[in-house]
């Protein structure tokens, strides 16, 4: 394996400094005793306390977690079923067509997705003569929509290492197709399912653009709450909030990588050598 040269190492270090230095400064000043962003007067947890006393921010945090959990659960269930159907599809053009349709949201800009979904929801609300259609329901549908392709692409490759005759063998032994799915397929891809759920949860926490267009005045998530505060003065308790979000996402990404590494090792682990038959 080719080693990196000194210039390449320095370049990579500079890139990481540019990426993470602003976050490090933000976390550092979240422990500042004063509200200054240029003078550190002393270590304090003052702004973390102020954060949890802000009812509007706590409500937005609860909304974000509820939305992320529900959308992740639903998108993971639908994505698992969809990945199974795509893999076992016998028509080649149908399978390729589904994969193409699945990849379009990944390449589509978030602002285009957000505006198009907003217009769709408003159009449906106009037909049904429902006012104030934008809210929790529209945000839930939007989050499931953009999380679903990632879930499918995370689970689908696992099927390539799965023996197609396992399900047939389970059916021959008396299992119904549904029972074989839960007894054979789901245990085989459970690591990818967990990784897909964590990824979907992280994507939901991180989303702002799509949520901004499909949200209503009665339901506000943390990214929208923070954006609304930038029109005035951002209070230091937002530094504490951003630090908590960064640490949470960082932990989730570590768990995702661990799950994917476990799946990789399980997929390519060596089979035990068969004992030689004795005469």
Image (spheres, rainbow, N blue to C red):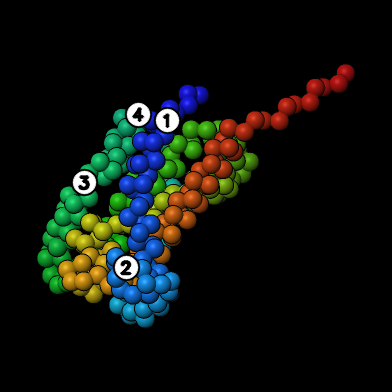
For marks 4 and 2, give the CA distance.
Answer: 63 Å
Instruction: Indicate the quadrant where residue 72 lies.
Output: bottom left
Tell me which label, 3 or 1, sits earlier in the chain.
1
User: What is the number of the mark on residue 16?
Assistant: none
Residue under label 1, please give it: 6
Tell me which label, 2 or 1, sits earlier in the chain.
1
Camera-nearest residue between 54 and 173: 54
Q: Position of residue 222 (x, y in %)?
A: 30, 67
Residue under label 4, please give it: 92
Residue under label 2, please give it: 39
Which residue corresponds to the image point at 14% horizontal and 58% vertical from the top-left? Answer: 119
Disc 2 secondary structure class: loop
Q: Position of residue 76 (x, y in %)?
A: 42, 52
Disc 1 secondary structure class: helix
Left/right placement of residue 235 relative to residue 30 reads left
Which residue corresponds to the image point at 33% horizontal and 75% vertical from the top-left? Answer: 34
Residue under label 3, please give it: 109
Tell us which disc is closer to us: 3 or 1: 1
Disc 4 secondary structure class: helix
Mark 3 burial class by Cα count in 10 Å: few <14, some 14-19, many 20+: few
For marks 3 and 1, give the CA distance.
Answer: 37 Å
Tell me which label, 2 or 3, sits earlier in the chain.
2
Tell us which disc is closer to us: 2 or 3: 2
Q: Position of residue 73 (x, y in %)?
A: 42, 58
Which residue corresponds to the image point at 55% horizontal and 32% vertical from the top-left? Answer: 163
Q: Position of residue 246 (x, y in %)?
A: 39, 59
Tell me which label, 4 or 2, sits earlier in the chain.
2
For marks 2 and 1, give the CA distance.
Answer: 36 Å
Disc 3 secondary structure class: loop
Left/right placement of residue 259 relative to residue 106 reads right
């Amino acid at each position: 394996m080719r080693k990196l040269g000194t210039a390449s190492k320095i370049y990579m270090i500079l890139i990481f400094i540019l990426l993470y230095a602003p976050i490090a400064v933000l976390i550092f000043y979240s422990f500042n005793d004063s509200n200054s962003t240029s003078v550190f007067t002393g270590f304090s947890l003052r702004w973390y306390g102020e954060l949890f006393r802000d009812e509007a921010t706590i409500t937005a945090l609860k909304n974000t977690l509820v939305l992320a959990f529900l959308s992740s659960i639903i998108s993971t269930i639908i994505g698992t079923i969809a990945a199974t159907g795509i893999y076992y599809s016998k028509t080649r053009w149908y399978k390729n067509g589904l994969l193409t349709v699945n990849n379009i949201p990944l390449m589509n800009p978030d602002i285009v997705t957000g505006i198009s979904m907003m217009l769709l929801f408003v159009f449906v609300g106009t037909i049904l003569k429902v006012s104030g259609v934008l809210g929790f329901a529209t945000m839930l549908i939007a989050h499931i929509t953009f999380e679903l392709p990632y879930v499918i692409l995370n689970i689908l490759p696992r099927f390539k290492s799965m023996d197609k005759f396992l399900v047939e063998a389970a059916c021959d032994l008396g299992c119904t197709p549904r029972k074989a799915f839960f007894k054979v397929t789901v245990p085989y891809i459970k690591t990818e399912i967990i990784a897909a759920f964590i990824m979907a949860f992280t994507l939901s926490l991180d989303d702002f653009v799509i949520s901004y267009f499909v949200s209503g005045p009665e339901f506000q998530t943390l990214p929208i709450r923070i954006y609304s505060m930038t029109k005035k003065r951002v209070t230091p308790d937002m530094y504490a909030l951003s630090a908590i979000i960064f640490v949470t996402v960082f932990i989730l990404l570590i768990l995702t990588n661990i799950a994917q590494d476990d799946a990789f090792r399980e997929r390519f682990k060596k089979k035990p050598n068969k004992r030689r038959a004795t005469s």
